[in-house]
Image: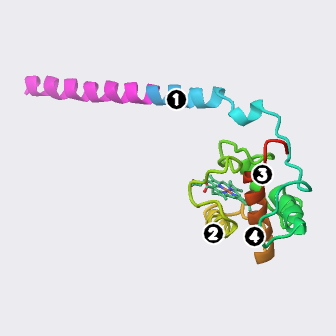
Amino acid sequence: MAARFIVLATAASAIVSAALVVSSARADQQELKLVTPPLSMFRDQIRPPADTLPVPTGFSREQIVHGDRVFHGEAANGQCSVCHGIDGKGTPNGNDLTAGMFVWSDGSVKELKRTVLHNMSVAPRMDGDLTPDDVDAVSAYVWAISHRSASQ
Ligand code: HEC
């Protein structure tokens, strides 16, 4: 009886100490996360110039200018720059949209529009008050910032 108790007690304490090791490792990770600032803090986030960005075929300069305002929260309560950065180059909460490489599409305005709509549906309360025209404009804007030449 006593021997059985000792075996049980030893097993229990082994489990408790294993759990402690795991939880202290987690605590370290948590701490690391808290003390490591997001890289987006270390760069000057310069807003791309909407008046000189390239305009995709079938869209107008006005749409790029409007898309820029939506992206930066100046129209339709858009929140894009909160997650994707003022320069569109990304934050820990949203990826870089300027590299010309997209995870979810081929980067055409049509496909970008599809991912923007999907993205907004998975970010409740961050989706602004975008009308279909606003979505067209902001998708054309994302195309524009992803097709910027080095001189712009
Ligand atoms: C709450 C944060 C957040 C907001 C607000 C937000 N996004 Fe995103 N967006 C993300 C994240 C995170 C991803 C990556 C999702 C993934 O890869 O599954 C993403 C992905 C995308 C993609 C696809 C990128 C790719 O590589 O294919 C586009 C385009 C995009 N967002 C545009 C926008 C636009 C335009 C707005 C504003 C109307 C917007 N996003 C608002 C967080 C956000």
State the separation of the CA atoms marked 3 and 1.
28 Å
Q: Identity of the amino acid at label 4?
A: Val
The residue singled out by tag 1 in the image is: 29
Name above or below for residue 78 compared with residue 27: below
- Mark 1 vs 4, N-terminal side: 1
Place of residue 24 in the rendered image (x, y in percent of width and height, measured from the top left): 45, 25
Place of residue 139 in the rendered image (x, y in percent of width and height, measured from the top left): 74, 64
Place of residue 145 in the rendered image (x, y in percent of width and height, measured from the top left): 77, 53
The image quadrant where one finds ligand 1 is: bottom right
**Which mark is on residue 81?**
3
Badge 3 residue CB within 8 Å of ligand 1: yes
State the separation of the CA atoms marked 3 and 2.
18 Å
- For this view, does 58 lie left or right of residue 4? right
Residue drawn 85% across and 68% down?
63
Say few, some or many: other residues with alpha carbon within 10 Å of mark 4 (under 14 / 14 to 19 / 20 or more).
many
The residue singled out by tag 2 in the image is: 114
State the separation of the CA atoms marked 4 and 2.
10 Å
